[in-house]
Amino acid sequence: MHLLDSTNNSVSNHMTTPKTLRARTGAFAAALLPLAVFAAQPPAADPLELDTKLQQLEEQALDINQQAQAAEEDFLYPDSSRVSIYVSVAIPGMLIRDMTVWVDDGAPVRHVYSESEAIVLQERGMDRITRLVAQPGAHRIRAQYTAQYSDARPTDPVFTGAYAGTFDKTQQPAELELQLRRDGYLTRPELRFHEWRKGQ
Amino acid sequence: MMRSLAFALALAFAAGTAAAADVYTPGSDKDPRVRTAQFLAGNKRYLDAAAMLEQVQGDAPQSRLAPAFYRDLADDTLYYGMPARAEMIYREQAASSDRRTAARARLRLADFYYTRGYFQKSTAELTAVKPQIPSELLVDWQDLMSRVLMAQGRYGEAADILLQADSGPPAQTEFMHYNLGVALIKDGRVGQGVNMLDRVGRLTPVDSETLALRDKANLALGYQFLSTDQGGTAVPILGRVRSEGPYSTRALLWMGWAYLAPRGSRQKKVEVGDESAEPGAFNSFATIGVLLRPGYIDSDSIYRRAKLAPFHLSGQAANEEAQLKQALVPWVELVNRDPMDPAVQQGLSDIPYILDKLGAHIQAQQFYERAIAAMEETRDRLDQAERHVMSGRMVTTIVRRDVDAQDGWGWKLKDLPDAAETFYLQQLLAENNFQEALKNFRNARQLQRNLANWKGRLGELQQSYRNRSTQGAAAPAPTPAASYGPAFSATEDPVAAPTLQMANRLSGSDSSAPDAPQPDAPVALQLATSPSADRFVGPYERMDTLRKRIDALLPQLAAAEAAESKLLQDVAMTDLERQRVLNEKLLTEARFALARVYDRQLKGGN
């Protein structure tokens, strides 16, 4: 917000008195103040019109993004073989550093979390670390994490832990959550496995 | 013994076996995709978050999902810069959401309209939400409403709202006090406005923002007195501005003018109505008033420091001489600052004028030469800045960081580029209309990249589809999808990663699974109607349609980017042109003044 720009006219009027010195300083004053003498010319394009037009394009782009995501998922990860693995943190102040997941004998999937990602993850939501395809039946899953409390000193050791287990893939998409949590203040953080299934 | 060992092993294994699946309702707070969207939104990836939520709705288009789902969708779309959908959802949710959540959401929407310049819409939104505002959000409402009204020039109404805010808890912020002072002065209630600005000018700062606000209030107040011939009152107020800060050079310049202005009369305090018994203490030493403390003025040291030898005072009245000497004090300090600052350049012009008047012609000539050199350099720099702006380099440099970040409306300009134009456009860069146009420019560019990536990605998937059709299982696998969005640097491989394992039991035999068929349920067989080939819409056909839509949208986004860039250029060029005119004016005056000095010397005048 400009400072007192409505006072500029009165200032200029006062400054243009016959006194030589004050006339000079008055001219400087009027010239220095924003929007006083040289009012900004309106730009050629209407900013609001441009903004409204862009909003419409953004809506279309959002729709394309959604449909493209759906088409890609239908093609690469059909419901019958899709396995989605999510990571969540249920310990306030615990920042996850990295997570590595193996399914069966497949290549590991590793994600190193940035500071901001780790902060968001311990507040709300969960990260879909990977999607893959698997045929119906039993599968092995292993995971390993590194985490540290947000107030930990650089010299403090990090928490590490692992999980190994199995899950059954049915004809429905498998949605697996690996949640870092602990049961009480005196217990160590541990990785818990949840399987989610869509209800009606 | 062997049996008990096997039992223990079985128990140990069971610990790692998946328990029964938890069932979630699509769109609920437990839905993994909703939670993933929350994670994405938390990381300011609003477009990805909104697309994921749209997909959840797309899977059940007829279903009415949880209210929180729609709130998240509205927030994500609004933060990206699409208020229309958000507004619709907020209105629908007004009855079903709790009062505080609904009010906060609509305040956010009104704030969006305000920053984008839709003042009427913002006013309408704020007026509509007023009856539902809970007491703890009342100050936020009053703050925003007053700013919207002031942006429309409705200062009286803004002042009335802020005066109401001041009368009850929770307390309004110092920024609101400042705005109230400005609104009152502009509405003609000068006495009350001055009182309010004076109060802000005496506040005890708690951080750099309030420190800057205090300086701003003192500068505005000082100028208010200066402009009404109250130089005597303006001087101590301008002296409260920090000696080193964003407003210090202007305060020094105006302080010099204040010494030359009429002293004015004693000011009477006009009460606002909420005066407390204890006035705020002014407790900073790093101010201009302390820097130029009394006693310093009477000594010659300050003139010597500026290489001004004691000069001959010719024919000036005693009081005018004192005024001129006093004005020199802040200006001598001023001219030691950055010579590219317009206030410093004016100081460089003002000092020789006074010196000339006092008879110190040689020193006046030297100062004029310094001023002219600084102004000529400014002119060259302004030329360079204009060239950069015209070439389009300015906006691309400003938004060069995090080009793919989806901050949208929430994007903030964190650092300024080290470029010629930056110095001259500092004030402009901080203004809403410029920043919002910059955000739109960024969004247009980011969306083009996003869609181009999707186009490439969809083409790759279609190629993979064709290969599968012709080569069967021998076809190369497509690149796996990224976790979110159309990136190509995926880390997982959907084909290679999972290998088929021999199941130790049939998944279908688990009758507890929610999807397990009932063994005795009757099987209803129906004839299927085969879709005609030309109307079949599978993933391949959908990808085809999407690529065509992208092809149609990309040029429109490019045009929007160009239009926003042009808008930013025009605004910047107008501002630079204003500064150029000012610079030329000062330069011309300084040259004429210098010529007069030379002329006098040639003619042998004093």
Image (spheres, helix red, strand yellow):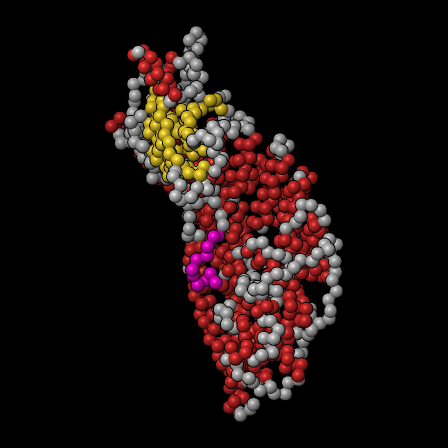
Position of B209 with respect to A104 (left or right) is right
Query: In terms of depth relative to the viewer, which is nearer, A109 or B95?
Result: A109
Picture residue at 64% right of the left edge, 49% below the top: B143
Query: In terms of depth relative to the viewer, which is nearer, A65 or B278?
Result: B278
Horizontal and vertical percent position of residue A177: 42, 28
- Please, is residue B264 above or below residue B98 in the view? below
- Please, is residue B88 above or below residue B339 in the view? above
Horizontal and vertical percent position of residue B417: 43, 57
Quadrant of the image containing the N terminus of chain B: top left
Horizontal and vertical percent position of residue B453: 37, 41
- Please, is residue B497 above or below residue B110 in the view? above
Residue B147 painted magenta: no
Query: In terms of depth relative to the viewer, which is nearer, B83 or B519?
Result: B519
Picture residue at 47% right of the left edge, 45% below the top: B407
Displayed quadrant of residue B83: top right
Picture residue at 49% right of the left edge, 45% below the top: B408
Quadrant of the image containing the C terminus of chain B: bottom right
* Residue positioned most to the top: B520
Dominant SS type (magenta): loop
Is residue A53 visible to us here?
Answer: no
Horizontal and vertical percent position of residue A178: 41, 29
Residues rendered magenta in the picture: B413-423
Is residue B271 visible to us here?
Answer: yes
Residue B422 painted magenta: yes
Picture residue at 66% right of the left edge, 43% below the top: B138
Displayed quadrant of residue A12: bottom right
Q: How many marks?
A: 0
